[in-house]
Image (cartoon, rainbow, N blue to C red):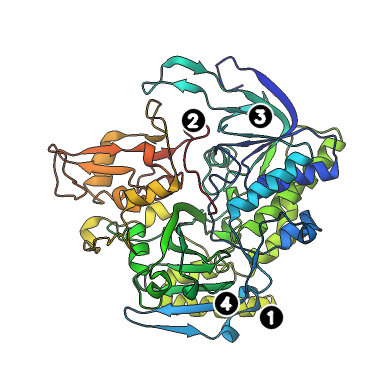
Amino acid sequence: MSDEIERESMEFDVVIVGAGPAGLAAAIRLKQVNPDLSVVVLEKGGEAGAHILSGAVVDPIGIDRLLPGWREEGDHPFKTEVTADHFLVLGPAGSFRLPNALMPPLMNNHGNYIVSLGNVCRWLAGKAEALGVEIYPGFAAAGLLYNEEGAVTGVYTGDMGVEKDGSHGPNFAPGMALMGKYVLIGEGARGSLAKQLIARYQLDAGREPAKFGIGLKELWQVKPENHKLGLVQHSFGWPLDMKTGGGSFLYHLEDNQVAVGFVVHLNYKNPYLSPFEEFQRFKTHPAIAPTFAGAKRLGYGARAITEGGYQSVPKMSFPGGALLGCAAGLVNVPRIKGSHNAVLSGMLAAEHVAEAIAAGRANDELISYEEAWRGSDIGKDLRKVRNVKPLWSRFGTLIGVGLGGLDMWLNTLFGFSPFGTLKHGKTDAASLEPASKHQKIAYPKPDGVLTFDRLSSVFLSGTNHEEDQPVHLQVKDAALQVSSEHDVFGGPSTRYCPAGVYEWVDAEGNAAADPSAKDVRFVINAQNCVHCKTCDIKDPNQNINWVPPQGGEGPVYQNM
């Protein structure tokens, strides 16, 4: 075992980390295949769904297979079917709508549902518990346990009551060890255990680098006259320049609610860019702002999104377990959808795990799962769109999106691409350029009506962390943070973080995220963190390591 604290241990057939769509689908499917299996799901949020953030327009292909009769049940969350699908290109002052006929069939949202993915997970958690799955919310999986052969045998939960200096406080309680024949990792994008496993077993060998975006989202209650039930609207273009990838969504849900979000691809170059401020600017566009006239903002959140797709998916099996869903990067980028593949991957892994356990196996590698996914609906979904992201990154928005559309058509009609499978090249961290190559961006001040600052936004996320605990955002080398992140890159952490966690201040305490500022110190307001993982992805030196705080902390998303 790689952990020296004496811990109480519990034995299960299968241990699942993360009560997202992938983890819960795996748990349900395991019980469907073999009701006698003991299955536990660990969730770091205070309840299932608390940390789940997505657009979300859900393709029901996964739910249909997992729970075929769900439509006949009254308690499901899928209340709003998509009725209209609009694609806009925004310029600084106007917009034009792309004809739907130009879009490949895979981009069509009819038959999909606008829904809160957090509420889908709350519903799935109920289904899992009814089948006898044990779900432990408020427990973060802090580390992995291995046997002498080097295979994963379980996880341990975070210790509670550890003081800021790392000492054991009066309320110290060691975490539990949860042992399993197999461990399934469904932590979402850039999970801390998945990151360790990918490094330890070199699961990314021969794959393209993982790529990410940051998605920011608000939930609004709008006036009835501005509400169009079932409308799905996507856009790209302004306020981003033509070299920076990203876009927006506007989804009209039930009860006069509108989910509005903005995605910025994290391979952007300019360290002065702030995804949060770009999102606020976007809402002021004449094609967007009228929707929010006289409206009330109800919620805010942010989360990293996997964007590498087909060529970046790491090996999904490792000795003792498997990666599921966004932990493996199964998002279809042009469709802005990943939950359908998350559910399908959870089901696929569960079937291979149940088969292995039935054959008397344990803690070995589920290589059959790794071999199966590319030939499944997951692989087919991701393969058709594999070149969209690299074409966009290579040729910019105008040409790149056009070529990506052509590529999707060719893949759909003929199963072929003239580009083959393009590479992504650099990591998102390596894409950032020194501040000296770029101009500062002057963002407008928030008006508190349509546009807001980060702190009032974070308040709406419900995030909370006890201050008297070790900071869960670990800076590996403090001197490097000053000499490089600040002095070379101009303190991009103060801008890429959507929650105002990071500050550079001078000796007087003034903001100093500027290479010319001297005698600066790095301040981490860890209690603001919404667990988006952007810092872990975008820090140019990979000098910030995100680890879970105490269980039950972080955001509490409602209807997000």
Distance (Cα) linking label 2 and label 3: 19 Å
Which amino acid type is marked by label 4? Asp
At mark 4, the secondary structure is strand
Using residue 411 as the reference point, say whether residue 299 is left or right of it: left
Q: Name the residue at 30% across, 60% down.
A: 270
Residue 358 location, quadrant: top right
- Name the front one of labels 1 and 2: 2
Which amino acid type is marked by label 3? Gly
Which amino acid type is marked by label 1? Leu
Q: Which residue is mark 2?
A: 550
Q: Name the residue at 69% across, 38% down.
A: 321
Using residue 414 as the reference point, say whether residue 102 is left or right of it: left
Distance (Cα) linking label 4 and label 2: 41 Å
Which amino acid type is marked by label 2? Gln
Q: Which of 484/99 is in front?
A: 99
Using residue 474 as the reference point, say whether residue 191 is left or right of it: right
Residue 146 seen in the figure: yes
Q: Position of residue 97 (x, y in %)?
A: 48, 84
Distance (Cα) linking label 4 and label 1: 22 Å
Q: Which residue is mark 3?
A: 154
Q: Which residue is mark 1?
A: 413
Q: Position of residue 246 (x, y in %)?
A: 43, 66
Specify the label residue 85 is tagged with. Answer: 4
Relative to 362, residue 290 above or below: below
